Amino acid sequence: MAAQLLTEPVIRAIDANGLAVGGAKLFFFLSGTTVQASAYTTAALSAAHPNPLVADSGGLFPPVYLDPAVTYRLQLKTGGGVLIEDVDPVSFGAPAEASPAEVNAGVAGGKYVSPAGLAGWTGVAAALGYAPLNKAGDTATGLNLIAAAVPAVNAAGFLGLPVVTLNATADLTPAHNGRMVRHSDGGAHTWSLPPMASGGWVLATAIALRNVGSGVVTIARGSGVALRKGGSSVDADVALTQWGFAVLTLEDPDAWVAQGSGLS
């Protein structure tokens, strides 16, 4: 690291009234001690200043360069030796990099996090709840989503019909939205549609139904729920027979339409 030009705590010695202190003395020590340390006339650190360094009649000191490898203690005194200021430590070394634990605890003052460190910090994704594709302010362009051979049911950008097997009498729920609920059992079962107030449905919910089992699946209406087959005004439960396929759509509050084959 290059040598640092000292600009603080003093360039010109002044007293408590803001007046210049002619002939003031600036002492350089190792931090925490009165052991003298060298300050230099140039950035090359080849020539040391006198210690103490004496200001001119206007209290002005010549340029002072400090060794970045040294932590200093600086004392400013009048020409008669009266202490004006004692500053310890004074250091221009590179700041340390903060660890994830320090950042999480809020105790990383004076430290930094490098881009490489941030990129490798798994705590970012944990804190966000997802792995960001782009940094803040970026415009997402040219991003391709490639579905896995067996994609997760909530995979981003997946537009297929994840298959959920349901060989039981049960309520259909919003968790079935955008999926194929598949029956493959020989026993008869009932899948019920609860009302929006208790079922948590949102309009435009769409659920695909498939029955490959020999048992009939009855789609039953919950309290206050209407269910009509496409092309019919009849509000009634419907049955999905073996090899049948249908789509349920919530078109209005508590009003479902079923369209497909194998419905009765």
Image (cartoon, grey):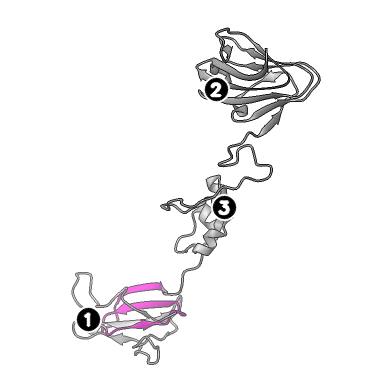
Q: Is residue 151 above or below residue 19?
A: above
Q: Is residue 164 inside the magenta stretch? A: no
Q: Residue 253 at x, y = what percent?
A: 50, 16
Along the horizontal axis of the image, is 14 left or right of 65? left
Residue located 40% across and 81% down the image? 3
Mark 1 lies on residue: 59
Tag shown at residue 201: 2
Measure how far apart labels 3 and 2 are at the Cα level: 34 Å
Left or right of 194 on screen, residue 187: right
**Secondary structure beneath label 2:** loop
Q: Which circle's residue, 3 or 1, is located before the other in the chain? A: 1
Which is more N-terminal, label 1 or label 2?
Answer: 1
The residue that label 3 is drawn on is 123
| Relative image position of residue 67 (x, y in whole percent) | 42, 82
Q: Which amino acid type is shown beneath numbered disc 3?
A: Gly
The amino acid marked with disc number 1 is Gly
User: What's the residue at 35%, 88% (across, down)?
Assistant: 42
Q: Is residue 64 magenta?
A: yes
- Picture coordinates of residue 143 (x, y %)? 51, 51
